[in-house]
Amino acid sequence: MPISDDRGQPTGVGPEFPVTPNFHPDTLLDGVSTLERIVREGVYRSQFETVTSNER
């Protein structure tokens, strides 16, 4: 199953490839916890998008 289209854009993966996101729900970014941000935005963002890590 391809995970990108002919332009190299991601198409996502199906249920046969389960993913478990791992994050610290209480980490703050601009005063908002990771968990609250996920609830508000409906999107999980990686540490590369949020510029957070275990060391922050």
Image: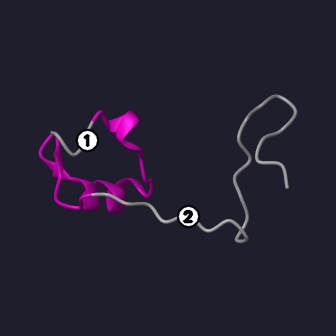
Q: Position of residue 55 (x, y in %)?
A: 17, 40
Three-letter amino acid code of the residue under disc 1: Ser
Q: Position of residue 17 (x, y in %)?
A: 68, 65
Classify mark 1: helix, strand or loop.
Answer: loop
Q: Quadrant of residue 21?
A: bottom left
- The image's colouring method is one colour
Q: Is residue 40 left or right of residue 11?
A: left
Examine the image and state in which quarter residue 15 appears. Answer: bottom right
Which span of residues is magenta-colored? 24-51
Compared with 46, 40 (above or below) is below
- Name the side, left or right, on which 24 lies relative to 46: left
The residue where tag 1 is placed is 53
Identify the image quadrant of the C terminus. top left
Residue type (three-letter) at the residue carrying disc 2: Val
Verify whether residue 48 appears in magenta.
Answer: yes
Mark pair 2, 1: CA separation: 19 Å
In this picture, residue 20 sits left or right of residue 12: left
Question: Of the residues under marks 2 and 1, which one precedes in the sequence?
Answer: 2
Residue appearing at x 77%, y 31% in the figure: 8
Q: Quadrant of residue 48?
A: top left
Q: Quadrant of the N terminus?
A: bottom right
Q: Residue furthest top?
A: 7
User: At 24% from the left edge and 58% from the top edge, which residue is drawn?
Assistant: 24
Residue at the left extreme of this rendering? 31
* Tag 2 residue: 19
For mark 1, does the 10 Å Cα neighbourhood hold few (<14), some (14 to 19), or many (20 or more) residues?
few
- In the image, is residue 13 above or below residue 16? above
- Where residue 11 sits: x, y (%)? 74, 47
Report the front residue among 42 and 14: 14
Decide whether residue 55 is among the magenta residues: no
